[in-house]
Image (cartoon, grey):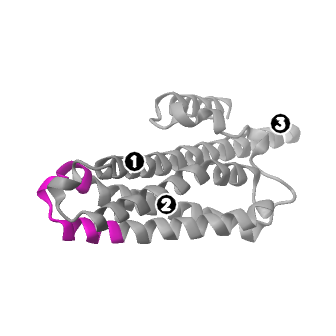
Amino acid sequence: MRIHINRVLGLLFTFALFSPAAVLFCAALPGPAALTSPTANWAEAGRATAMINQIQNQAWKVRREVGPLAVEGEQLNWQIHSSRLGEIRTQVNEMSRDLSQLSEMKNQLEPWQQQLVHSMTRNIHELVYQTQAAIKTLAAQRDTLALALTQYPDYLNAIYHNANHLAGSIGTFTGYVSAAQKLAALQHGAGGAKARS
């Protein structure tokens, strides 16, 4: 049993060292004692986990949609830009609504979920602002060659990087929590086995 626990600890350490988002996000990771709370509402915490996973999926979709606009922008006509930005706006608005619901539920969530909601807030607010700014700039200038001379490419890059960081950070955070919960369960099981022997 001790070998198994050491293996899990080793995997946690490796995960923390080599995860791409870990360097940016490790300071925000909760300590093992901050994973659960007796005041958390089990049903709301479960619902929150589903919403957090949905936000991560939406962030990946935003990244996929904006990628071609940022890379091939001048080669694509403005209708393609408009269509993709419309899809991005839909995803970002859904993320914003989910974040608003999570914020309202905050006091009923597990401590790690509260911390994650807090850390997601800035990225989602930035996504809302950058998406609105990109749409406004596109509406004012429908020539994609002329768009390259505006702040439009900067907005697209900011959307891409915010979406990428948001999705990666959620993955790092939830991966750490899952591993820490498994480790805590193993340690609890090992403690119970020692007490029985």
Q: Quadrant of residue 3?
A: top right
Mark closest to the chain's N terminus, 2 or 1: 2
Mark seen at residue 128: 2
Residue located 21% across and 50% down the image: 148
Is 70 included in the stretch rendered in magenta?
A: yes
Which amino acid does the dot numbered 1 rest on? Ala
Image: 61 above or below 2:
below
Where, quadrant-wise, is the N terminus in this rendering?
top right
Residue located 51% across and 53% down the image: 126
x, y percent for residue 39: 87, 59
Q: Which residue is mark 3?
A: 194
Is 27 included in the stretch rendered in magenta?
A: no
Which amino acid does the dot numbered 3 rest on? Lys
x, y percent for residue 184: 73, 42
Q: Which residue is mark 1?
A: 158
Q: Quadrant of residue 66?
A: bottom left
Locate residue 188 relative to residue 17 in the image: left or right.
right
Element assignment for label 3: helix
Check if mark 3's residue and mark 1's residue have beta carbons within 8 Å.
Answer: no
x, y percent for residue 180: 66, 42
- Viewer-nearest residue: 183 or 80: 80
Q: Quadrant of residue 75?
A: bottom left
In the image, farthest residue toward the front: 140
